[in-house]
Amino acid sequence: MNRGLSSISIVAVLIFAALAIEPRSIRAAVDRVEVQTRTIVADGASFGLVGPYVRISGRLHYSVDPESEFNTAIHDLGLAPQDNRGRVTFTGDFVLLMPLDPERGNGRLIHDVTNRGNIVALSRFNDALGLTGARTSADLGNGFLMEQGYAVLWTGWNWDVAPRANTLTIDLPIATEEDGSPITGRVIGEIAPLRPMTSARHVGLGAIGYPPTNWPSQSDRLSVRDAGDDTYEPLPRESWRFGRSIANEDGDQTLRDPAWVTLDAGFEPGRVYRLTYGARNPPVVGLGLAALRDALSFFRYEGRDTAGTLNPLTTQGGALPIAALAYGHSESGRALNTMILDGLHVDEQGRMVFDGVMIDGAGGGKGSFNFRFAQTSRHVSPDIELDFPTDFFPFSTIEQFDTITGERSSLLAEARLLKSVPRIFIVNTSTEYWARSASLVHTDTLGNTDVPPDPSVRLYVIAGGQHAIGTSALRGSLVHCRSPLDHRPVLRALLSHLDAWVSLDRTPPASRYPLLSDGTLVPADAYRTAFPDAAFMRTPEGPLSPPSLDHGTQFPNTGIADKIPPTRGTLYGTRVIASNEDGLEIAGIQLPDISVPLGTHTGWNPQNAETGAPNRLSRWFGSFIPFARTVTERNATGDPRPAITERYISKDDYVTAYAEVTLDLANQEMILGLDINPMIERAGLLYEKVLSHPPSEESCSFTTVQPQ
């Protein structure tokens, strides 16, 4: 006999129905999704079995509870203006790519954390050229993420990104004193010119920076030091001014631009200039990280915003994701590091917003992302003084004692307290060992003892890889040609492993990184000793060794620096990956270009003498130093490395050896099957270009290989 609904059941059904159509609790941190455009991308091209993709863009309207225990890490949040609900509100851009037919997607959402407002994942996973707007076929590259069925989300979070084409921005509230008066403070800018110039930018890449409080002010300081020196000497205040010098028919005039400084005597290449000046009206910078958290929380968990608007993922028959991944490269990876360090990967309802995260190319860094007068787009060259301690310690993913500062911590300390530890892939290239202190992720702070990763973490290192994938026909300011090593096939495989670990609980491949215990991680002097000795191959003096810094007693708890610039202390002990007799690294994931080489690939590339700082390393690029083609050429240049004709009988011999190693790498699941043939084809083209390149030719065009 069928029973009718009881009165209690009827009430429950009515309440459930009301909740389905009424706005959610104000605890939701995205009040409103404002969709501005919805367009089919790539002229309606179909991506495998998934079909066409749609691009949805607009603004996210956030509201954050300053009283929430999950927001206590956000410095100055209590000094931001509040609405009539007692919440702090702000807005930022978003872009969402999703299958036009959501049921044909794979149910996973990837949040690609923008880098200085730019989309990154399409160049890293889809081989797209340059930074894109995710609209055209060229923007989507080879379509890998789309053919897999991912929905991909981008949101603005950098307060200081200058608005321009295809960048995502955010408008953060300004902190004020409790009485409503403006907050003032001091900020630092650094300039490392590569050529003589009268005017130079002192803010980060593509950034707007903080304008000076007073023009001019005698309290502002511009100081200078020589490359490799630690002591800054002040320049006379009357010798420089804010603004950009513009030459015209009436003579030089200074354009009023606070992001620039003009020095009457001119900036000299190779020297480092440090600017400290007064500023006011700091945004609550840490809300940028909260925006990353809350955007992903909304798209991951919420069917509607508080205004009742559907989550775009749930339109057209779609559903909430079964898993969410976060990806960040370089600055974006450091932002993810900082989110996890501060516990800002857990939303106001105590939910972890991403199940898995890939931190790519961050080295040992965190970032200038959550304190007063922080500059999120700040850029530091490898030998320039690092002015914020949040760039580095803590390094490792298990707790360790910092013998330099006397602190005990780990990247995951707060995540463990919150019982919300995501599954993490940390991926670095050789460049991060030279220019971003990556060894400290898996050693003690003095670089004397191996420190293994947490069980929730895998560490993967790309042997001989460089931070930025790409070559150029010109050497530019660098001594060597950039490395043509392309490790994006490894990134695609690792993304698949992270997805499987999160979605299917499938154990990923073991970590692959250098160790002190087996001699694959060594001090710089041991590296130089083992490196091939030839006059045309100049090895660097050493990697970046960041200092401990004292910003005063307030900084750890309030994010307010008492000492600007900070007091510089003991250097941390960094190490690099050992190399063999060819100068090729012997630990990590070795692509066929390393196992079956045509030359030496390194993660470092020195600047040339014209820059005035020949010992300074490129922040992004490694080197490719091809082998001599013949024994005669090798003897003529004094190259100790065997020539190409001593290694391979012919192109077919080389390609056969390369193919064998490629297949083995696929069997190890370090690359996907879809990348095997393109890698082999590219290897054959590179062989032809290297063999046709005479050693006297300065051009690097032979490294620019693009299979048809």
Image: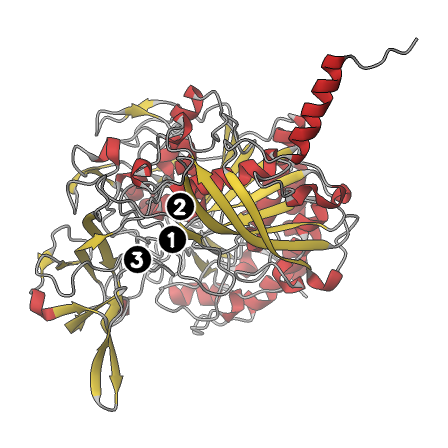
State the image quarter where residue 639 is shown.
bottom left
Q: Is residue 701 above or below residue 430?
A: below
Specify which label sits upstream in the sequence, 3 or 1: 3
Find the residue positioned furthest to the front: 7
Residue type, numbered disc 2: Glu
- CB within 8 Å, label 3 to label 1: no
Q: Nearer the viewer, mark 1 or mark 2?
A: 2
Q: Secondary structure at mark 1?
A: loop
Query: For mark 1, what is the residue?
Result: 604
| Residue that appears at 25% across and 31% down | 557
Specify which label sits upstream in the sequence, 2 or 3: 3
Left-right relation of 685 to 697 = right
Q: Secondary structure at mark 3?
A: loop
Specify which label sits upstream in the sequence, 1 or 2: 2
Q: In which quadrant is the N terminus drawn?
A: top right
Q: What is the crowding at mark 1: few (fewer than 14 residues within 10 Å), some, or many (at least 20)?
A: many
In the foreground, 296 or 486? 296
Q: Position of residue 218 (x, y in %)?
A: 8, 60
Left-right relation of 156 to 355 = left
Find the residue positioned furthest to the top: 1
Q: Which numbered circle lies on residue 432?
A: 2
Q: Position of residue 156 (x, y in %)?
A: 47, 50
In the foreground, 423 or 364? 423
Residue type, numbered disc 3: Gly
Q: Position of residue 173 (x, y in %)?
A: 36, 47
State the image quarter where residue 289 is shown.
top left
How far apart marks 3 and 1 lie (CA) works out to: 29 Å
Q: Which numbered circle lies on residue 209?
A: 3
How far apart marks 1 and 2 lie (CA) works out to: 9 Å
